Image: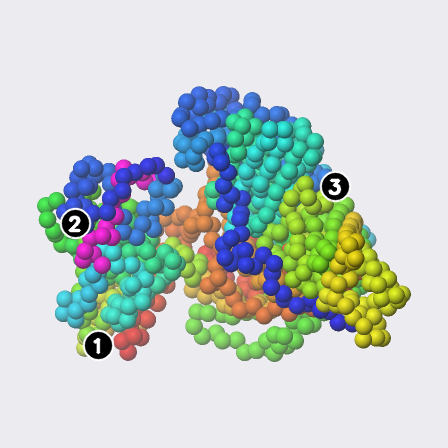
Amino acid sequence: MKSFDYFEPHSLEEAVGLQQQGQGRGCWLAGGTDLLVQMKEHVRQPGLVINLKKIRGLDDFHFDSVTGLRLGALVTAREVETSPLAHQHYAGLARACTDFASIQVRNRATVVGNICRASPSADTLPPLLADDASLCIHGPRGTRTVALEGFCTAPGRTILAPDEIVTHVLVPAPAPGTAKVYLKHGRREQMELATVGVAVSLTMSRGRCSRLGIVLGAVAPTPLRVPTAEALLLDEEPTRDRVHAAAAAAAQACQPISDVRASAGYRRQMVEVLTRRALVQALEVLR
Amino acid sequence: MTAFSIIGKSVKRNDLIDKVTGSAKYVADMQFPGLLYGKTLRSNVAHARILRIDASRALALPGVKAVLTHSDVPRVLHAGSPHPRSASLSCDQYILDDKVRFWGESVAVVAATSEEIAEEALGLIQVEYELLPAVFTVEEALRPGAPLVHDLGPGGNQVLDPVTCQRGDVEKGFQEADLILEGDYEGGRPVPAYMEPNVCTCQWDPTGGLTVWISTQTSFMVRGIMAEVLGLPLNKVRVLVDHMGGGFGAKQDLFQTEFLCALLARKTGRPVRMEFTREETFLGGRTRHPARIWLKQGFKKDGTITARQARIVYTSGAYGSHGPGVTNVGTTALASLYRCENIHVVGSCVYTNTPIAGAFRGFGVVQAYYALDIQMDEAAVALGMDPAELKLRNAVREGDVAPSGHPLIGHGLEDCIRRGKEEVGWEALRSRERDEHGPVRRGWGLGCEMHGSSAYPGIKEQGNAIVKMNEDGTVVLFTGTAGLGTGTHTVQAQIVAEEIGVTFESVSVVHGDTDAVPWDIGAFASHTTYMGGRVAQMAAAEVKAQLVARAALQQAVDPSQIEVRDGVVSVKGTDRSVSVREVMMPKRGIPAPQFVGSATYHPTKSYSFAAHFVEVAVDIETGAVKVLQVVPVHEVGKVIHPVAAAGQIEGGIQQGIGHTLYEDFQIDLKTGRSLNPNFVDYKMPLFMDMPTIRTVLLETAPDPGGPWGAKGIGEDPIVAIGPAIANAIYDAIGVRFHHYPIKPEQVLAALQEREGGAQ
């Protein structure tokens, strides 16, 4: 590991100031479970590391039945995993946080960190995207809120400027009649990167599907929402045939690659199986 | 002996407190004043001649103390695994060569004041290569006119001349057969993935003596070859091994770092530590030998095997390492397990420009019995028989010739199969109704194996032990057996305590210092109990004889009247008893005696047996296979420490599940580059992936060569689990796999192919 300067600012302004002084060569540290590994393996060699843990308010974990869920940048995956509220209203996210790495890692790794890492196989991104989450971003020009969709631009890349911090993730409150499922395909129970991940967030009203998010992980450069699949079910009765057709459309839409974990063809087949299973499970929850 | 005091009891391991409190010191934990850190520059080409190495920029980096390349080190041709008594070795390695033969081979080393500086220095060394054509597969290596990995050896990229094992007349056997089965089987490239990466620290003293702290299974072999290569007498090389984080056979080899570390320490006059990164344990470590097996057998209608013919080809990678031993053991193994009078088996081992295969738990037999046991299952289906019945009918037994050439003792394999059938209710399982609803199909499979405890006859082994009794009746065992983490020092202390008749707690064990303990061949070949335990027992018996003689004199009775048990000496048929301590105590100003016993033991071979009964669940939509439960039945002669024995079995099953379903170290077949030398992409099953395991230990075929009949257990479990899983997958979905690892993707493709064929 190369030597670096280390800071523990007490406010967002101070943090952004440090980053500007460092001409954007700094890295934010929250959980550190990715950053430290990357530094040890020379993937990243920051000139300064700015620890966000001393900044007040970043450990927010708040749910309101009208405004929804608000998670600060320091909220860990383990906090979500062990939260009854998360399980009740954001079952997909809670599942993703449970399937993620190991308990030891989840005790440190943050949800916002997982978002900003922008890994194609990130577990928390598909359920958050399926739920239409958005992000609060603080930077030199103040605070802005952006949709999560479009935030990740390529593997490891986001629209975030070096001197900006994602302070919170916001997830709308679920409408009555909503079910959420995240299914992860990997070889192991834990300590696994998804070969394929599928999140479904589905709302039924009067026997028809009134809102639907289907998002695929690990089968495109960024997590992929599949409107072509969603369209086959929206405003429709979710019959067996329509569910199968939506799963097939999801498989059609994905852009997987072949690597040591799995071939593109297999990933595509798994998208179909997992999408169908996720939809069926969501409908079963609502039955 | 009527009843045991300590043998058969799961006493508290003597390394337990050290390990659970974290006070156990491993080599990388040891601090030395002035320590330098050594790092290795590894090749990024698979086969090349080194034209030029420029280390001047590295040497100029502040903190860099030395750089060594092939032109700076002694050019001594040596064996990667220099077993002093091995019948077959491949002497094909230099400390550093002017050629590289696989992607990731050592090219140069650096010693610096910090790991970071050493690493940075590696990036400053410039190497100019002349690329040579390379061979990455057996097919490429055996093609006429193929590029040669070595100029040595029998030629044609063969590590050794083919090994043939023959008896009877296979042609006649096939003529008598009612059914002939023939198939190709393939074993992948798993790695041992021990917890503790390879590590050593070297320091020279002012008198020219070298001390080596190292994680190795074979400290005396390290001493021997380092002394030879560095031109030192044996008393000037001291090798120290304390705690180890596993080895699984691979840490029998030297990894070039040992020599280089010593040379860096000599050059700089400071202690130097070289520790592999996890990635280096893949690149510069040892893998299991990938293998191709062609197997053909003839059967009578009643299941009798009339002939067995096979060709087995092991891939050695860039160096011979244990290739000769693995080829001999694996080839001869195919002549056993299931009885057959007409055998013709040929084994060979081939050099390729890939990472080095070496010794690894199961030693060539994992591959061989994977093929043989699966083909037995196929035969049972073709003959309309129960596979367990077919295997039982053909199981080797008392008097049959073992792969080692010895007659087998007892009926261990039959006992394992019979007991396992009872444990799982096999008959009922065979006739159960299948649940065809939903995407999950369940299946049961049986896999069998036998494995030798000791490397005889390939290596004429020798174990030594010294036991001394202190003046208070406590006992010290000096053993050369390395403790890989298996609990062997606990087992040996149990044996010594039982033999003398003292408590387990009164025996301590000195190990891992080549200056202090007697010579040992190393901890491998499932022999630490069979050989190390037996020789400890022999040395303990000598001390006991001295103790009994002294007690008899004190009690004025014949020595045959003396009994020693749990630290108490009593006179038979009387109520007279004294403690061992009292017998030993100084008397009237005369010091206590010093009782020392020593023994040397040259074991031959015994065989342990196992039958694994396995249930799997196969998801027919994803191809995922989950092992639900395993009932391993092992016949081990005598159980010394039940929990340690079960631990070996559970660990072997975990590693075997990994081999069969997950683990695959992949090499790019265009460049020779390693594709997944890390734990992110090289997957092993973890605790949460483990099935329920209900272990049964049998003591029905004790071997007189081991302590109280005890045989080995270390390697056996990893051999049986593989074919058991493959056979269970067949039972679940009716698809037969001939290779490992069996990946979900392949399961799904096979199912879809069958569907396509049916349409």
Q: Is residue B148 left or right of residue B338?
A: left
Splitting the image into 4 quarters, where does residue A20 fall?
top left
Q: Which mark is residue A207?
A: 1
Q: Is residue A64 left or right of residue B134?
A: left
Q: Nearer the viewer, residue A165 or B488?
A: B488
Q: Position of residue B422 (x, y in %)?
A: 65, 76
Q: Nearer the viewer, residue B705 or B390?
A: B705
Amino acid type, callout 3: Arg
The magenta-colored residue range is A43-59
Between marks 2 and 3 in the image, the one whose residue lies nearer the viewer:
2
Q: Nearer the viewer, residue B167 or B694?
A: B694
Badge 1: few (under 14), some or many (20 or more) residues near its Cα, within 10 Å?
few
Against B65, is B171 above or below?
below
Q: Which mark is residue B85?
A: 3
Which of the two labelled residues, at mark 1 and mark 2, occupies the earlier sequence position?
A: 2
Q: Which mark is residue A12?
A: 2
- Name the chain letter of the residue that bears numbered label 3: B
Q: Is residue A201 left or right of residue B312?
A: left
